[in-house]
Image (cartoon, helix red, strand yellow):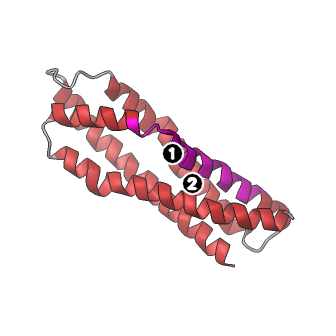
Amino acid sequence: MIARTAFIATTVSTIGCGVTAGVLLAFSVSVMPALRRQPAGAAIASMQQMNIDIVSPAFMTIFLGSAATVTLAAVTSLWSGQDTRILVTVGAVLFVVGCVAVTIAINVPMNDALAAVDPDSASGAQVWADYMERWTRWNHARTVAAIAATAAMAVASRR
């Protein structure tokens, strides 16, 4: 029973980590480069709206649900003594620490600070330049962590 639960949780985690990786990758390779080419006020207003819209039931279920399923996968695979337990645990740590914790500790506070900026203010351009550089750098890190977690879970679920 525990081994079956571990397998199901690992499989579900693979999907959730992959979907999350895709969303983060889209920001890294498309959204942020497009915003970089916009005037600061327009970019700030757009990012402020995206930061509101991303906190949707669909995305939050995938994002936080993936954190829960990778944790369940790691615990059940360790408990069952499966050969894949180290790989599943590595995937879980990559996702929970490299993606979820970074989001909560770094990206969300930056989003909250940007929400307070008047897009049309004189100081907005400097705030945006600092935000864009730092937020994008950390988003790249989250993206790599989510992709690596997906890979670990995918390999584990195939064994």
Residue 74: in magenta span: yes
Q: Is residue 120 left or right of residue 23?
A: left
Q: Which residues are magenta?
A: 53-75
Residue projecting furthest to the right: 1
Residue 54: in magenta span: yes
Residue 30 in picture, x, y percent from top left: 27, 55
Q: Secondary structure at mark 1?
A: helix
Q: Secondary structure at mark 2?
A: helix
**Kind of residue indicated by mark 2:** Phe
Residue 15 in picture, x, y percent from top left: 56, 62
Residue 9 in picture, x, y percent from top left: 70, 60
Q: Which residue is mark 2?
A: 95
**Kind of residue indicated by mark 1:** Ala
Of the pair 55 and 30, the residue shown nearer to us: 55
Q: Does residue 141 lie above or below 127 as drawn?
A: below
The residue located at (80%, 67%) in the rendering is 4
Within 10 Å of the Cα at label 2, are there few (<14), some (14-19), or many (20+) other Cα atoms? many
* Quarter occupied by the N terminus: bottom right
The secondary structure that dominates the magenta segment is helix
Q: Is residue 137 left or right of residue 34?
A: right
* Quarter occupied by the C terminus: bottom right
The residue located at (32%, 41%) in the rendering is 134
Cα–Cα gap, marks 1 and 2: 18 Å
Q: Which residue is mark 1?
A: 58
